[in-house]
Amino acid sequence: MRWLALGMALLVALAIIAIGTQYVSSPRTATRSFGLPLPEEGANIAWWLRLKGVRDIVSGLIILAFMAWGAPRGVGIILLVEAIIPVGDMLLILAAKGSTKSAFGIHGLTAVLMVLAAIPMMIGAP
C-alpha cells in the first residue's frame, strides 16, 4: 500500500510541477483550464499568472525533496497540508461561479488523491 501511496505522491508532484511550468511559460493558456475566466487585460497580467506557476513548481519540489530525503510520514504530512491548496482552489472557483466541472473534476479530485496518498504514509501502512 505504501508503494501505491508513494506512486500517487510522485504523480501529484510531477503533475503540479508540469502545471507550474506551463503557467511560467504560457500563463494565458494554462489559465484557461483552471476553471475561472481569464483575468482582465493588462501589461502585468502574465507576470501575476507566472507567480502561480512558481508556487506550483515549488509545491511539487517540496514533495519530491521529502520523498528523496525524508521519511514517508513526512511525505504524508506535506501531502495532507498541501491538499489545502486544491481545496481552496475548488472553493474559490465555486464561490466565483466558475466552472463546476473544473472545480470538482480537477481541483477536488486532486485534493482527494493527495489525501488518499497521505493517509497510508502517515499511519505507517506497510
Image (tube, rainbow, N blue to C red):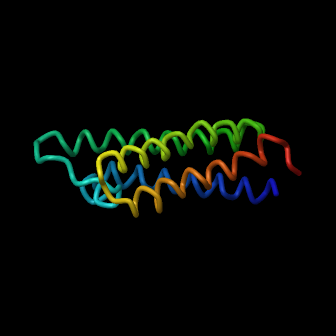
Would you place residue 3 above or below residue 77 in this image? below
Residue closest to the eye, 126 or 103: 103
Residue closest to the eye, 109 or 63: 109
Q: Residue at x 34, y 45 (%)?
A: 95
Q: Quadrant of residue 78?
A: top right
Would you place residue 98 above or below residue 72 in this image? below
Q: Residue at x 82, y 41 (%)?
A: 123
Q: Position of residue 106 (x, y in %)?
A: 46, 59
Position of residue 21 in the picture relative to residue 1 (left or right):
left
Q: Position of residue 34 (x, y in %)?
A: 35, 55
Q: How many marks?
A: 0
Position of residue 39 in the picture relative to residue 114 (left or right):
left
Residue closest to the eye, 15 or 119: 119
Q: Position of residue 21 (x, y in %)?
A: 40, 52
Q: Quadrant of residue 44?
A: top left
Q: Position of residue 32 (x, y in %)?
A: 28, 59
Q: Residue at x 30, y 52 (%)?
A: 97
* Image quarter in which the N terminus is found: bottom right
Position of residue 89 in the picture relative to residue 123 (left or right):
left
Would you place residue 58 above or below residue 125 in this image? above
